[in-house]
Image (cartoon, grey):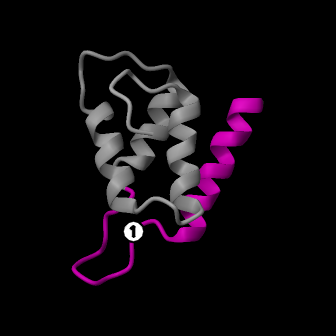
Amino acid sequence: MTGTDQPDLDEIEAWFSGVVEGRVSRDAADRWAGRWYTDDSLEWDALSLWALRLLYGIDLRLGPGEPYLADDERVAGWHTELRRRRTG
């Protein structure tokens, strides 16, 4: 999950899985997604862009030491929705 080539939807989903399963920090996922989301030279399909947009900012909090804007349940829901959209 650290390549330099533009990630595909499998890799984006792997980052979501990593956050949901606690293998990847929210900060790491945000930084990874931000690297790709802010690169204006890249083109994305709608689903990949939607997922990247969610990952980019996944570590935002209401304030220092406060809860995340998107709690664990919401993040798991986004992951489920991504998987549903991929197969639907």
Residue name at image x 27 percent, y 36 percent: 35
Q: Residue 74 at x, y = what percent? A: 56, 63
Q: Quadrant of residue 73?
A: bottom right
Q: Of residues 7 and 45, which is closer to you in this image?
A: 7
Helix, strand or loop status at disc 1: loop
Instruction: State the extent of the magenta-drawn residues as a range.
Output: 58-87
Residue name at image x 54 percent, y 55 percent: 18
Residue name at image x 34 percent, y 51 percent: 30
Q: How many badges with numbers are in the image?
A: 1
Amino acid type at mark 1: Leu
Q: Quadrant of residue 68?
A: bottom left
Q: Residue 37 at x, y = what percent? A: 32, 33
- Tell me if 49 is positioned left or right of 88 in this view: left
Judging by the rendered image, the residue that carries numbered circle 1 is 69
Q: Of residues 2 and 9, which is closer to you in this image?
A: 2
- Looking at the image, residue 56 lies above or below residue 62: above
Which residue extends farthest bottom? 65
- Tell me if 81 is positioned left or right of 27 in this view: right
Q: Of residues 35 and 3, which is closer to you in this image?
A: 3
